[in-house]
Amino acid sequence: MTVFADWMRQALLEGRQGDLLAWDRLAPEARRNHPTPEHLWPLYSALGAATPGIPARLLHSSTDRAILAMDAFAFD
């Protein structure tokens, strides 16, 4: 799980929106971690409402039971 979460976190912090949109092809272990995308839709809704070109800010990062990333981001 951590390799996928780490990839997503870095892509968000670096503002790699093109990579984020192609997460299912580019992120390691993408479909193993998210066989269906509905759990990612709130993230993409926030990303779409953010100011273009401004990377996300990490507010919190943790893992629950070694299987669930609990990262929280702010989008300016």
Image: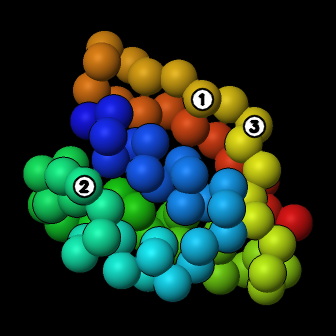
Q: Identify the residue at horizontal 54%, vertical 49% (top origin).
A: 9
- Please tell me the numbered disc located at residue 61: 1
Q: Does residue 1 appear anywhere in the picture?
A: yes
Q: Quadrant of residue 37?
A: bottom left
* Residues under numbered marks 2 and 1 in contact, where contact means CB atoms less than 8 Å apart: no
In the rendered image, is residue 34 in sight? no
- Tell me where residue 30 appears, x and y as whole percent: 22, 59
Going from the N terminus, do you reach mark 2 or mark 1 first?
2
Q: Residues within 10 Å of mark 2 (few under 14, many from 20)?
A: some
In the image, what residue occupies the spot 79% across and 85% down? 52
Along the viewing direction, whichever of 9 and 47 lies nearer the viewer: 9
Compute the Cα span from label 2 to label 1. 19 Å
Instruction: Determine which residue is flagged by label 3.
Output: 59
Give the residue at x 75% y 37%.
59
Distance CA(mark 3)–CA(mark 1)? 7 Å
Secondary structure state at the residue bearing disc 1: loop
Label 3 SS: strand
Residue 17 in the image, given as x and y percentages of width and height: 58, 78
Q: Quadrant of residue 2?
A: top left
Front label number (2 vs 1): 2
Disc 3 and disc 2: Cα gap in Å? 23 Å
For residue 28, the mark is 2
